[in-house]
Amino acid sequence: MRGETTPRILVVEDESDTARAIQRLLERRLGVLVDIAVDGKRARECMLSNEYDLITLDYQLPDCDGLELLRELSEMTKPPPVVLVTGHGDEHVAQKAFDLGAVGYVLKDERMLEVLASTAKKALVQA
């Protein structure tokens, strides 16, 4: 984790109920600070003004796809770890995400919150 302060996570998710559920889960389970961005534009603004220890990134956003944002992050000097979250992906999307540096790939299904919490915890420990 970066520094000794409370880890900060950016949740990029356009579905407000899903974003709030992820936020509550990560704050409770991992004791982190969570910011929410509802689209790619807002995510870029957040990344310019804050330093994040982890980003959870929805694959389908209203103004771009998660792989596009992940590609931009991969070009940063010291990008934070990224977990791609999707309800519409497949093996091809997963492989592209990992090729672009994602540290995790989580499906939006009944196990999403549990898997995401575990994946985020591992990513924060390794950062």
Image: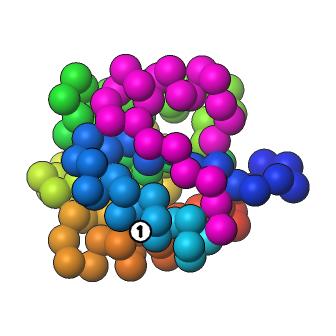
Q: Position of residue 38 (x, y in %)?
A: 33, 35
Above or below, 31 against 43 in this view is below
Q: Nearer the viewer, residue 85 or 30?
A: 30
Give the labeled residue for mark 1: 116
Above or below, 120 against 102 in this view is below
Quadrant (top left/top right/bottom left/bottom right) for the C terminus: bottom right
61 left or right of 120 in image: left
Picture residue at 19% right of the left edge, 71% below the top = 109
Residue 121 seen anywhere in this rendered image of the structure: no
116 left or right of 86 in image: right
Task: Report the magenta residues as a range.
Answer: 31-52
Q: Amino acid at mark 1?
A: Leu
Q: Nearer the viewer, residue 31 or 85?
A: 31
Report the number of discs: 1
Residue 38 seen anywhere in this rendered image of the structure: yes
65 left or right of 11 in image: left
Q: Position of residue 27 (x, y in %)?
A: 56, 65
Q: Nearer the viewer, residue 120 or 9?
A: 9
Quadrant (top left/top right/bottom left/bottom right) for the N terminus: bottom right
22 left or right of 87 in image: right
Picture residue at 32% right of the left edge, 44% below the top = 13
Picture residue at 12% right of the left edge, 52% below the top = 88
Q: Position of residue 103 (x, y in %)?
A: 49, 56
Q: Is residue 91 magenta?
A: no
